Each structure stands twice: as C-alpha cells, then as structure tokens.
Amino acid sequence: MTNTTRRRALGALGALAASPLWIQKAFAQAATTLKISHQFPGGTVAEGDFRDRLVRMFAAEVEKRSKGALKFEIYPGSSLMKTNSQFSAMRKGALDMSLVPLAYAGGEVPEVNIGLMPGLVTSYDQGYGWKNAEVGKELNRILLEKGIVLVSWIWQAGGVASRTKPIVHPEDAKGMKVRGGSREMDLMLKAAGAAVVTLPSNEIYAAMQTGAMEAALTSSTSLISFRLEEVSKALTTGRNGAYWFMFEPLMMSKTVFDKLTKEQQAMILAVGGELEGFARKAAQADDSAVAAVYTKTGARVVDLNPDIVKKWQTIARTSVWKDYADKNANCAKLLALAEKTL
C-alpha cells in the first residue's frame, strides 16, 4: 500500500469515527450477514422440506423487518459443514445459526438428549407445552450457559422405515440393525434386543441401501425428504401416536446473538416464535403424508396405538430414563420436570 493510499484509508476511518452515531450504527448494521446451516434437502420458501422452508421464511422476514440490516446465507444439505459439527461450531461462534436435532449434541452436552428421549413426549401438545413449562425454562437456561440461543421450538413425531418387516412391538426389533437417532433411543432399542447403528439422518439412505442398516427411526419429514421409501418395504407411522418425538429447534450462537442490537435480538426471537405454528402444522401434515408416499411404492404401512406406545415407554422408563437422570444433576432435574408434563 502506498503512502497516499494509506492516508486515504486512515482518513476514511477517521471520518467514520467522527460521524454521528446513527451513521456509524447504520454502517455497521449494513454489513451483518448471518449464515444458517442445516442437513436437510434445499428448496424454496414455497416448496420442499418444511425445515428448509422455515429457515428461508425466517431469513426473509427478519431481513424485511430489519430493513436489510440483517441478511442471511442458507446452506442446506450440510453444504457448509458436517451435520454433527454444527452445534459445537455455534457454541464457539464459528457458525451463526442452525436447525439441527438437539440430541445430536448429546455426546458434548448430555443434558440435550432430553430432546429425543423415548416415550417422554408422546404428543405435539405436550412437546410444545414444554416451552412455557418449568422443563422448557430449565432447558433454555442450560443452553444459554452452553452458548446456544433457542430461536424456534420445533417438535416432530417419527416412525420407522424398514428394509424387511415393520417394527411395531418391541419384540419386532430383536436381532435387527436399527438406527434410533439419539443415545437414549439407541439404549431403548438395545433393551428390546436390537443392534444399534449410529449416524445422522442424511446418511440413512446409503446405509439402508447397502444393508449396513435394516431399519431407521426418524421424523416423518425425513422419511419423505430423504426418499427412504426407495429402500424400504415397511413403514410404521407416527400419525396415530408415537414414542419417538424429536426436538429439532432453530438455534443461534449466543456469541453472535449478543453482538446484535437489542432490537435485532427481539426481532429474531419474535419471528422465530411466530414460525412455530407453521412448523407444527407442517410436521403433522407430514405424519399423514408419509403413509401415502410409502403405500404408493408398495410398502406395508402400519400404525401404532396407545397400548403399543406404552409398551415402549415402559422399557424406556425402567432403563433409559434412569440412565439419563444418573448423568448429572441437570439431567435429573430436567427429567423430573419433563415427567410433570406427562
């Protein structure tokens, strides 16, 4: 850099520093672009996986309300970073936002496995009720301490896609290689006699295609979006009840959140909360739609009923829930508060 160029640059910075505060603030806000990462197939605001749609709706609305001061870049399909790296990256401030199953971070923060605890949440009313209940407030406190801000609460029921026979009763899983989706779900499957396989939902298709895995529990939306009907001969839906309910929120790095203005923070939380109604309706629509998708391919489709859900819940209560509560004081408290919502 020449002396003349250097003087011009320093002069520009000096002029900015001497300018009115509102000009400095506007300049800073204009440069704020946040990156949102997720593992699901990309689409548009109007079409595709509802989780990708929600992220795009969120980005568009926040940009609109902030009058362009906040902009977003969206990276679907784990195109920015690996699925299991997202939570840790947000904690470090290396990733701004992500929509990811909270339980994927259970190895790093054991408390978050409450987000995919078998049989603990059995309805959408119960799951969404957590937000304003004691259990939700405690979970929010823990996540803030870990560097994570909850932006949108998203719950999804799930089912089981299988290469062979449907998994309905616990005894059906015996001897099968099954993906549960969380450490706790895997423990329940082991108690039922299954051999568990651990991997994120965007890797299920390849594992089932090769036979490395025989069945997978995942959300109704993922059962559709990842085209698992192409490698399945049976489906157990969650439309009439489920023991598999996953908490898959839109989250933000607290480090990044804290750098925003109070107005921007309030705006992000407001838009995130407003989109929860869309998320619930979309998830429930997929609970029904998934049956038609699999029926069309000739797969055998079956449903659960309350008595079957209780069978799975009984296995979970006597083994998995106790294991979780024994992890630490936070886990024990979260479980006790969650049980109050049953």
Image: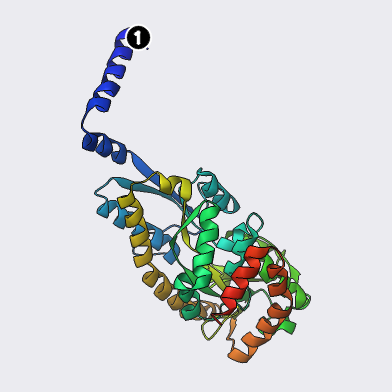
Left/right of residue 143 with respect to residue 34 in the rendered view:
right
Instruction: Please state which of residues 179 and 140 is positioned toward the viewer in this rendering.
Output: 140
Left/right of residue 20 with respect to residue 40 in the rendered view:
left
- Displayed quadrant of residue 31: top left
From the image, tell me which residue sits under label 1: 2
The N terminus, quarter of image: top left
Identified at 33% across, 56% down, the residue is 266
Q: Is residue 110 above or below residue 36?
A: below
The answer to whether one can see residue 125 in this image is yes
How far across and how far down the image is residue 17, in percent? 27, 26
Residue sitting at the far top: 3
- Colour option used: rainbow
- Displayed quadrant of residue 325: bottom right
Left/right of residue 122 with respect to residue 189 in the rendered view:
left
How far across and how far down the image is residue 285, in percent? 43, 77
Q: Is residue 151 above or below residue 237?
A: above
Instruction: Please state which of residues 320 and 161 is positioned toward the viewer in this rendering.
Output: 320
- Displayed quadrant of residue 342: bottom right
The answer to whether one can see residue 179 in this image is no
How far across and how far down the image is residue 47, in percent? 37, 65
Identified at 42% across, 66% down, the residue is 50
Query: Callout 1, which amino acid?
Result: Thr
Q: How many marks?
A: 1
Identified at 50% across, 46% down, the residue is 80
Instruction: Please state which of residues 234 and 20 is positioned toward the viewer in this rendering.
Output: 20
Secondary structure of residue under mark 1: loop
Mark 1 neighbour class, 10 Å CA radius: few under 14, some 14 to 19, many 20 or more: few
